[in-house]
Image: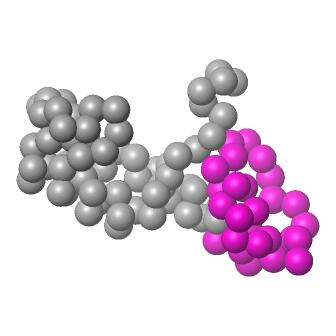
Amino acid sequence: MAEYNKERRWQVPNKRAKNYADERKAKVHQRGQKEGKELTDFEAGLRSGYLQCQSDHAGLYRYRSAMEAGYSKPDAKKFSREKGTKLKGGKK
């Protein structure tokens, strides 16, 4: 697996939707490397389609599963961002 692709970047889905809606209204990037630059038509389309939802839902599911298994919040967050790992016994 490529070095840059080892960690899943996810947000709570309704937070991403709110951020994307704010960016579309302003027609400007509001965070990240392109902050302050105008959105292209393609980027505006991505924000209207919420194409990141699969990763967001997977990350949230993994976080909740880890919390139910007894992981601490920092450990559950770390687990939810890892790709290709399975949930092991809970840590109390």
Q: From the viewer's perspective, is residue 76 above or below residue 1?
A: below
- Residue 86 part of the magenta segment: yes
From the top left corner, tell me how far across and down residue 64 is, in percent.
64, 71
From the top left corner, tell me how far across and down residue 20 is, in percent.
24, 53
Residue range (magenta):
64-92
- The answer to whether one can see residue 65 in this image is no
* The quadrant where residue 38 appears: top left
* The quadrant where residue 92 appears: bottom right
Give the mark count: 0
**Which residue sits at x=46%, y=57%?**
11
In screen coordinates, is 19 left or right of 69? Answer: left
- Residue 78 part of the magenta segment: yes
* The quadrant where residue 78 appears: bottom right
Question: What is the residue that sits farthest to the front in this orientation?
Answer: 36
**Which residue sits at x=66%, y=24%?**
3
| Quadrant in which the N terminus is drawn | top right
From the top left corner, tell me how far across and down residue 71 is, in percent.
79, 71
